[in-house]
């Protein structure tokens, strides 16, 4: 049994006879602000910051997707590129965890075209902010 990390941020588990046992997404622990890349699509970002952080999305492109999970109550902001939208918010607005956030709050964001992101799964409190 061995694993291979694919370019889609998934780990593929493969038996010695070449059959695939399945996949599991890559998880990244986030402690500081970061710019997310296209190559990280499919990744789960788990926040463990000591102070508020901003995670900047790449330009929207159909199919890109990211999951953000809070591990504590520290604020996390997910910021699109200028001109891109998250759901029905105004261009350039970001989505984030408010001061009432709780461990386990989660948002999954998918790009549905070249300028729009859509939050398809929201658990807990996530708010629109400029």
Image (cartoon, helix red, strand yellow):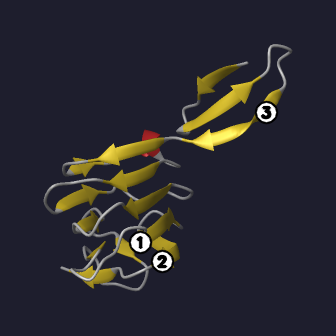
Q: Are marks 2 and 1 in contact (CB under 8 Å)?
A: yes
Where is mark 1, residue-wise? 105
120 w.r.t. 125: above or below: above
Element type at mark 3? strand
Where is mark 3, residue-wise? 21
24 w.r.t. 63: above or below: above
Q: CA distance from mark 2 to mark 1?
A: 5 Å
* Place of residue 21 in the rendered image (x, y in percent of width and height, measured from the top left): 79, 33
Element type at mark 2? strand
Numbered circle sitting on residue 123:
2
Horizontal arrangement in the rendering, residue 2 relative to residue 16 (left or right)? left
- The residue lying toward the viewer, choosing from 8 and 4, is 4
Q: Are marks 1 and 3 in contact (CB under 8 Å)?
A: no
Horizontal arrangement in the rendering, residue 27 relative to residue 75 (left or right)? right
- The residue lying toward the viewer, choosing from 41 and 98, is 98
Q: Residue at x 38, y 53 (%)?
A: 46
In this view, which residue lies farthest toward the top?
Answer: 16
* Place of residue 98 in the rendered image (x, y in percent of width and height, measured from the top left): 25, 80
Q: Residue at x 21, y 54 (%)?
A: 49
Q: Quadrant of residue 55?
A: bottom left
Element type at mark 1? loop
Q: Residue at x 19, y 52 (%)?
A: 33
Q: Earlier in the sequence, mark 1 or mark 3?
A: 3
Q: Residue at x 43, y 68 (%)?
A: 104
Q: CA distance from mark 1 to mark 3?
A: 30 Å
Horizontal arrangement in the rendering, residue 81 relative to residue 59 (left or right)? left
Q: Residues within 10 Å of mark 2 (few under 14, many from 20)?
A: few
* Place of residue 10 in the rendered image (x, y in percent of width and height, measured from the top left): 58, 38
């Amino acid at each position: 049994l061995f694993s291979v990390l694919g370019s889609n941020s998934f780990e593929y588990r493969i038996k010695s006879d070449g059959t695939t046992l399945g996949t599991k997404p890559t998880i990244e622990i986030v402690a500081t602000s970061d710019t997310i890349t296209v190559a990280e699509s499919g990744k789960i970002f788990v926040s463990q910051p000591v102070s508020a952080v901003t995670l900047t999305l790449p330009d929207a492109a159909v199919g890109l997707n990211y999951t953000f999970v809070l591990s504590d109550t520290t604020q996390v902001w997910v910021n699109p590129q200028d001109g891109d939208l998250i759901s029905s918010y105004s261009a350039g607005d970001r989505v984030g965890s408010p001061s009432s956030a709780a461990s386990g709050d989660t948002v999954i964001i998918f790009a549905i075209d070249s300028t729009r992101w859509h939050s398809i799964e929201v658990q807990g409190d996530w708010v629109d902010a400029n």
